[in-house]
Image (cartoon, rainbow, N blue to C red):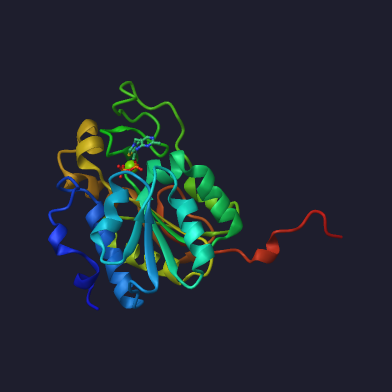
Amino acid sequence: MSVRNYLRPERLPTYWCPGCGDGLVITSMAEVFEELHCDEKNTVLVSGIGCAARAPGYFTLESVHGLHGRAVPIAEGIKIVRPELNVVIISGDGDLLGIGLNHLIHASRRDTDIKVICIDNQIYGMTGGQKSPTTALGVKTLTSPEGNTDRPVDCQALIKAHNSFYARATTFHLPLLKKAIRAAMEHRGFAMVDVRSQCPVNYGRRLGYRNAYEMLMHFKQHYKPVKGVVDRLAHDEIGITSENPKSQIQNPNSA
Ligand SMILES: Cc1ncc(C[n+]2csc(CCOP(=O)(O)OP(=O)(O)O)c2C)c(N)n1
Ligand SMILES: [Mg+2]
């Protein structure tokens, strides 16, 4: 199959605003799916609700468009019944790290063999630009007109608390994004790719970015790609972190 076979041209133009990063992520995913020979018999996509959660509908693969925050339990259910399938979630920061965060933490803790691609645009895009769990301190949004006073969720800390696979990428650094998605797909067990993406309309516009290009240039300047596999990523680094051996998790009740 070629990359084009994974996407549905008849559904174009997409629901997304011009300049949205979601299209870059689904194209990268399609490229990885092609490399790994994923098809509708061995791969299923799952999402919650949000702009990012519309992504599975643009793929030719089978998919479930679930409820807000419930992508993870749906994916876990599919994996339990059909363990031979690649179960891949693609959803947003509000969906996965806000309303759905409890599920995400428990799936990581259980090391359920699902892949989570989180398109983190730091905003509730679909509903008009309310602050999300990843909105940075001081950022002005529809619901934080004086600047956000809530500290953002540290996704890496939550996932790596259980020694699970975690990678961070951006929509500017496309080769790294693809590499991270592929590494997650090839990983056995829970794997999360945290993709920093741009929402030029409901986020960037309020912060003075004139277009998506300026937001991508911010990613270029702010994020430093890290070579190889590292233990932890600094807040401004992107790359793949190592999964620590399970043996490091000690059972306090054992002798
Ligand atoms: C139970 C429930 N609460 C709230 C909503 C409203 N809602 C729809 S999408 C959304 C936020 C989506 O944000 P995110 O997951 O970051 O996706 P984005 O649109 O930014 O890609 C919210 C709060 C809903 N649909 N269901
Ligand atoms: Mg969002």
Task: Choose between 98 and 220: the one closer to the eye.
Answer: 98
Q: Is residue 199 left or right of residue 181?
A: left
Q: Please give the name of the residue rendered at 23% of the width and 38% of the height, measured from the top-left corner.
A: 204
Q: Please give the name of the residue rendered at 52% of the width and 65% of the height, measured from the top-left corner.
A: 81
Task: Choose between 231 and 55: the one closer to the eye.
Answer: 55
Q: Residue furthest right?
A: 255
Q: Is residue 86 left or right of residue 189?
A: left
Q: Please give the name of the residue rendered at 55% of the width and 54% of the height, measured from the top-left corner.
A: 107
Task: Choose between 120 and 140: the one closer to the eye.
Answer: 120
| Residue 166 seen | no
**Image spot of residue 248 (x, y percent):** 69, 62
The quarter of the image holding the C terminus is bottom right
**Image spot of residue 141 (x, y percent):** 30, 29
**Count of numbered circles on the image:** 0
**Image spot of residue 94 (x, y percent):** 39, 41
The image quadrant in which ligand 1 is located:
top left
**Image spot of residue 138 (x, y percent):** 37, 28
Q: Residue furthest front?
A: 81
| Residue 212 seen | yes
Q: Residue furthest top?
A: 146
Q: Is residue 218 left or right of residue 86?
A: left
Q: Please give the name of the residue rendered at 24% of the width and 33% of the height, measured from the top-left corner.
A: 207
The quarter of the image holding the N terminus is bottom left
